Amino acid sequence: MGTFDTIISRNFPCVHPQLSVVIRLRFDLWEFGNHAFRIETRDLEGEMSMETINGNIEVRGVGNASAVSHLVFSISNLHFKNPGLINFVLFIDDKEVNSIPLYIRKGQ
């Protein structure tokens, strides 16, 4: 259990057996309601490295001026052709709101 931003493999192509992505989102009062989200993965050439994840999130308040929602998903058997960089890109209501890198390195 833990967090990481780098996967090291001795051989390519390679397969990473399992990883989870956890995203914590904070919405302000005026943003409460239903929102579509999309998560794309892109390499440095802009190619998609896995299928897009699509869904909806219902944001509800409990009397506060903001609310937190979580997106949690697991990815099995993620294939990497070569060392490089994969960006997980988050879109909310078709707007890109953030991204996080995953570095793929060749090890000894």
Image (spheres, rainbow, N blue to C red):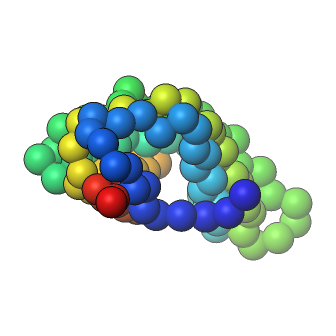
Residue 93 seen by the camera: no
Specify whether 38 is left or right of 66. left
Q: With respect to residue 4, does 89 lie above or below?
A: above
Query: How many labels sit on residues?
Result: 0
Specify whether 28 is left or right of 87. right
User: Where the N terminus falls, by quadrant?
Assistant: bottom right
Q: Could you say where residue 99 lies in the image, as x and y percent from the top left?
A: 38, 60
Q: Could you say where residue 107 lies in the image, as x and y percent from the top left?
A: 33, 59
Viewer-side residue, 51 vs 70: 51
Q: Quadrant of residue 7?
A: bottom left
User: Where the C terminus falls, by quadrant?
Assistant: bottom left
Query: Which residue does the image show at 21% across and 44% down from the upper left?
Result: 82
Q: Could you say where residue 77 lies in the image, as x and y percent from the top left?
A: 49, 29
Q: Could you say where residue 22 lies in the image, as x and y percent from the top left?
A: 63, 53
Q: With respect to residue 4, does 7 lie above or below?
A: above
Query: Which residue does the image show at 75% across and 72% down from the upper left?
Result: 65
Residue farthest to the right? 62
Viewer-side residue, 4 vs 93: 4
Viewer-side residue, 49 vs 25: 49
